[in-house]
Image (cartoon, rainbow, N blue to C red):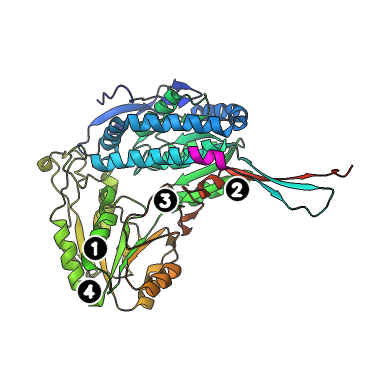
Amino acid sequence: MLTIDSLLRTSSFVNGFWVDAENGDTFGVVNPADGTELARVSDLSPADARSAVVAAHDAFPDWSARLAEERASLLMQWHDLMMENADDLALLMTLEQGKPISEARGEVAYGAAFVKWFAEEARRAYGDVIPSHDTDKRILALRQAVGVVLTVTPWNFPIAMITRKAAAALAAGCTVISKPAEDTPLSALALARLSELAGLPPGVFNVIPTSRPAEVVEALMADTRIRKVSFTGSTEVGKIIMGQAAPSVKRVSLELGGNAPFIVFDDADVDVAARDVLASKYRNAGQTCVCANRIFVQDGIYDAFLDAYRRLHTGLRVGPGVDEESDIGPLINQEAVDKVVRLLDGATQQGARIVLGGGLIDGAAIGGGSHAPGNTFFAPTIVEGVRDDMALASEEIFGPVSAIYRFSTEEDVIRRANDTPFGLAAYFHARDNARIWRVSEALEYGIVGVNTGTISTPVAPFGGMKESGFGREGSRFGMDQYLEIKYVCIGGLSR
């Protein structure tokens, strides 16, 4: 059992209290590295979750009326506590999610940075005085908090995905109900504990763990007191949430699936490009929505790139996330392993060739586990000869598999890169300035990384196009998702 006493919480956090499910139900949180149960967490029902709506709704008038400076000060205290407890937060995250401890520490700092950024932005939620159409009138545009916000977040970034939504909403004056992923509720509850210590008022930030997310979210979406939902997850579920928002016309932000191309043009520095592809591909064992899913390499440098990229793999170490030497941890569960195996087997049966890796690594042999129903440590894999009509090319792999594609011309690769319903992130390496402008503008993606494989930062707008969703998180645009614009016309000024 986990014994990080300062942060470990297993009850929901509602209205400033730690509350168990009314019927006493709990669900287990499992370490994906060895299959051990870390803790049992309160399993809220839809009825239990509605108490959070009441709390957030009742807390909203006071919280939204507070000075921006006061909200900012409380958020900064939350940020400071996150950083003071960064090591414990990182260990907790690694134990329940699996990522290497060094990545977990990076995520804690990244997640805390959103709290700091939006604490500062709270003071800058400006409105406008608009030149009037009439000498007798003055026109104002006020920006006011939307209301109660529901955030639904995934397991792959269990702290940062929450803070980049919740911090913006709280800074704007909204109150928040956070529904974390059932695989990783402990990180969310630890954030709630730190928010409590920071002095956030009761009902302002609530966390509701459940093993029945579809039922709970459906019930909450039917409640008209919730005025906004921000969801990160699959496109399939995002479409369901859009439908659930329609009857009460809730505001919706969606950050959905991706199918990121990483294009390496023949004028690129091959060694630098290979390192950037590696950094993009294997972060969190390839379990990110913005990681390279399709690696396109131009004919003239294809062999040189493949050789450089393969050499970089020799230094990668797969192992439990708590091992400081590990570069790649386990996949989150057996379902994730099954998907990677299905996609890889399908590609090889259709003619693709595995260059490196291609299967599981014995968990027991590397200090992890070999628990039933199966080991979840997957070897970093390179596969070439992949065609655009394979499932490996059209689905998110969400695992440590590098699928390599050849291309001949700029026009051809742009067409192929855009030939997907998704449009979250894309990357390319090139040195010709004209090409950099052309390709940046031609790629149909909300985020484009040029000569880099890492693009996430609180100061930039994060979000997608097409079926990868809409709305932006981070940057000054992130506040807009939680603010209404109210037009006020003041007349009778000449009397």
Earlier in the chain: of badge 4 and badge 3, it is 3
Q: Position of residue 103 (x, y in %)?
A: 27, 43
C-alpha span from label 3 to label 2: 19 Å
Question: Dot 3 surroundings within 10 Å: few (below 14), some, or many (20 or more)?
Answer: some
Residue labelled with disc 4: 301
x, y percent for residue 480: 56, 47
Provide the residue designation for mark 2.
Answer: 246
**Magenta residues (range):** 119-125
For the residue marked with disc 3, what is the amino acid? Ser
Instruction: Specify the quadrant of the image occupied by residue 290.
Output: bottom left
Residue marked by disc 3: 234
The overriding secondary structure of the stretch rendered in magenta is: helix
**Residue 214 in the image, given as x and y percentages of width and height:** 46, 40
In the picture, measured across the screen, residue 463 lies left or right of residue 130, that is left
Nearest-to-viewer mark from 3 and 1 = 1
- State the quadrant of the N terminus: top left
Q: How far apart, in angstroms, are the residues tagged by discs 2 and 4?
A: 50 Å
Amino acid bearing label 4 = Ile
Mark 1 or 2: in front is 1
> Which one is closest to the eye, mark 4 or mark 3?
4
> What is the number of callouts on the image?
4
Residue 141 sits inside the magenta stretch:
no
Query: How far is the residue under mark 4 from the one under mark 3?
Result: 35 Å
The residue shown at (86%, 43%) is 492
Direction right: furthest residue: 495
As measured in the structure, the alpha-carbon distance from the residue carrying label 4 to the one carrying label 1 is 13 Å
Nearer the N terminus, badge 1 or badge 2?
2
Residue type at numbered disc 2? Ala
Q: Residue at x 25, y 53 (%)?
A: 282
Determine contact: label 3, label 2, CB under 8 Å.
Answer: no
Query: On residue 272, which mark appears?
Result: 1
